[in-house]
Image (cartoon, rainbow, N blue to C red):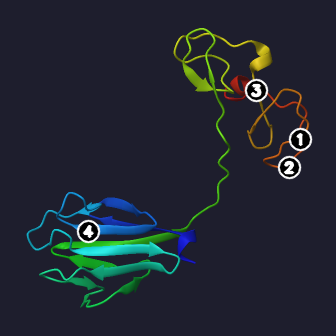
Amino acid sequence: MGLDIEYRLRLEGRVYVLPVGETFIGRDSDCLIQIADDLVSRHHARLTHSSEGLVFEDLESANGSQVNGEFVSGPVTLRAGDRLRIGLATMEVESSRRTQTMNPTLRLTLCPACGALMADEMSFCVQCGHRLPEARRRFCCRHCGTVLPPGEVHCVACDESVTGGEDPEDASQ
């Protein structure tokens, strides 16, 4: 349940995306969320993002922490819209469902002219401007934009039949 949700904390116009695992709040420089306030302990509180959701814990701080206006004495499971108060700082929890995106593997190659590292589908080197031979160029699916080898008739990304696609340079103009 909790790992398919992205949690964020809004504090004074800044938004912190909370990673899976522990996030510390406090004055100390090793805290992801640092609050420069004498009422805040060096390691004041901990947020834990796990499969159970998002849990807030005060770490026995000198001045305590509040969730929705109530002081907390143990772990509290948070939801979107909950408000945390630590010292003079008030934070709001936000959440959204993570969207699954396809992360294609980036293939790298070396420029034959200067040796710079470059993406395999590039038609020229950004370091020296050397243009690669036409046979090395890749083509894009007209339906989803996925890079395809020249002459490919089926796009594995969108499962559409294609007729060769178009040159990525022509598609971007």
Mark 3 vs 1, N-terminal side: 3
Crowd class of label 4 (few under 14; some 14 to 19; many from 20; radius 10 Å): many
Q: Residue at x 59, y 16 (%)?
A: 125
The answer to whether residue 22 is visible is: yes
Looking at the image, do the residues carrying marks 1 and 4 touch, with CB atoms under 8 Å apart? no
Q: Secondary structure at mark 3?
A: loop
Task: Determine which residue is flagged by label 3.
Answer: 138
Say which mark, if any, is on residue 154. 1
Looking at the image, do the residues carrying marks 2 and 1 touch, with CB atoms under 8 Å apart? yes
Q: Secondary structure at mark 4?
A: strand
Looking at the image, do the residues carrying marks 3 and 2 touch, with CB atoms under 8 Å apart? no
Residue 35: x and y, percent? 19, 64
Name the amino acid type tagged 3.
Arg
Residue 136: x and y, percent? 76, 19
Residue 145, relative to residue 164: is it above or below?
below
Residue 68: x and y, percent? 30, 86
Mark 3 vs 4, N-terminal side: 4
> CA separation, marks 4 and 2?
46 Å
Name the amino acid type tagged 2.
Asp
Task: Determine which residue is flagged by label 2.
Answer: 159
Say which mark, if any, is on residue 18. none
Looking at the image, do the residues carrying marks 3 and 4 touch, with CB atoms under 8 Å apart? no
Crowd class of label 2 (few under 14; some 14 to 19; many from 20; radius 10 Å): few
Side of 60 relative to 152 (left or right): left
Say which mark, if any, is on residue 25. 4
Q: Secondary structure at mark 2?
A: loop
Q: Along the line of sight, which residue is nearer the eye, 171 or 41?
A: 41
Mark 4 vs 2, N-terminal side: 4
